[in-house]
Image (tube, rainbow, N blue to C red):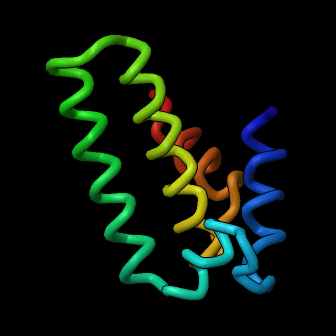
Amino acid sequence: MTFEELFETIKSRKDSSADGSYTASLFQKGISKISQKVGEEGTEVVVAALSQSNERLIEEISDLTYHVMVLMAYKGLTLEDILKELESRKR
């Protein structure tokens, strides 16, 4: 799966019912819950980096990436927005 495919899947759940979809349930809970999850996952990445295996770190980075993409979709941002910003930081 590519980042683009994952992001498209996440966006497709934005306006759907939560019937068994964790992503749809996050969208329904709103920005506070989504932001809370991003914060929790960020902390878990730090803990994994400092004291856990690389396998656990990969899992936590994956969780953080997913939740950041949910946040982006909620706020109407695109992958291109992020890539453009990163490109602007090149020296």
**What residue is rendered at 68% in x and 75% in y?**
24
Q: Quadrant of the C terminus?
A: top left
Residue 67 x/y as whole percent? 51, 56
Q: Which image quarter: residue 19?
A: bottom right
Q: Is residue 84 above or below residue 38?
A: above
Residue 44 x/y as whole percent? 27, 40
Residue lying at the far front of the rendered structure? 20
Q: Is residue 74 above or below residue 61?
A: below
Question: How many numbered circles are shown?
Answer: 0
Q: Is residue 44 left or right of residue 47?
A: right
Q: Is residue 22 above or below residue 56?
A: below
Q: Is residue 12 left or right of residue 38?
A: right
Residues 87 and 16: in front is 16
**What residue is rendered at 63% in x and 49% in y?**
84
**What residue is rendered at 43% in x and 15% in y?**
55
Residue 85 x/y as whole percent? 54, 50
Q: Is residue 46 left or right of residue 72?
A: left
Q: Is residue 80 left or right of residue 67?
A: right
Q: Quadrant of the N terminus?
A: top right
Residue lying at the far top of the rendered structure? 54
Residue 70 x/y as whole percent? 59, 64
